[in-house]
Image: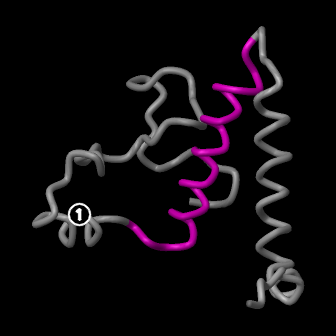
Amino acid sequence: MAFGDYPAEYNPSVHGPYDPARYYGKADTPLAQVKLSELGAWIGRRNKGPQAIAGAISRAYWRWQHKYVQPKKAGIAPFLHVVFGGMGLFYIMNYGKLSHHKNYKYH
């Protein structure tokens, strides 16, 4: 599969129009339904390659887009997601500098 192509599992005659938020591979047990004894085998069945990780991130992005950004009556939620996500990211990036400015109580 080259960059920008449809997934190999996608078949237009079976699946209809392409949806970037849908996984077209073989269905597996959802993580919420996996028992602790089966967790190792479930993780072992996952494709952990860079292309699979990029595809999972892309599907998550498009699900977020379809749910929060693209509805007809989209609210302020996507803006707040970006703002608070940026706040958390920059807090993590600057934690080393911020940790030196803690207020200690000496008694």
Against 26, residue 35 (above or below) is below
Q: Quadrant for residue 40, please give it.
A: bottom left
Say left or right for 95 vs 7: right
Q: What stretch is highlighted in magenta?
A: 47-71
Which of the pair 83/64 is nearer the observer?
83
Q: What residue type is labelled 1?
A: Trp
Q: Quadrant of the C terminus?
A: bottom right
> Residue 4 placed where, x, y %?
69, 51
Name the secondary structure under disc 1. helix
Give yes or no for residue 9 being in the magenta stretch. no
Say left or right for 105 vs 12: right
Residue bearing the label numbered 1: 42
Q: Which residue lies furthest to the top in this view?
A: 72
Give yes or no for residue 66 being in the magenta stretch. yes
Say left or right for 49 vs 103: left
Please report the residue visible at 19 percent of the width from the left and 53 percent of the height from the top.
Answer: 34
Give the mark count: 1
Q: Quadrant of the N terminus?
A: bottom right
Please report the residue visible at 81 percent of the width from the left and 37 percent of the height from the top.
Answer: 80
Against 22, residue 103 (above or below) is below
Q: Quadrant for residue 45, please give it.
A: bottom left
Against 72, residue 66 (above or below) is below
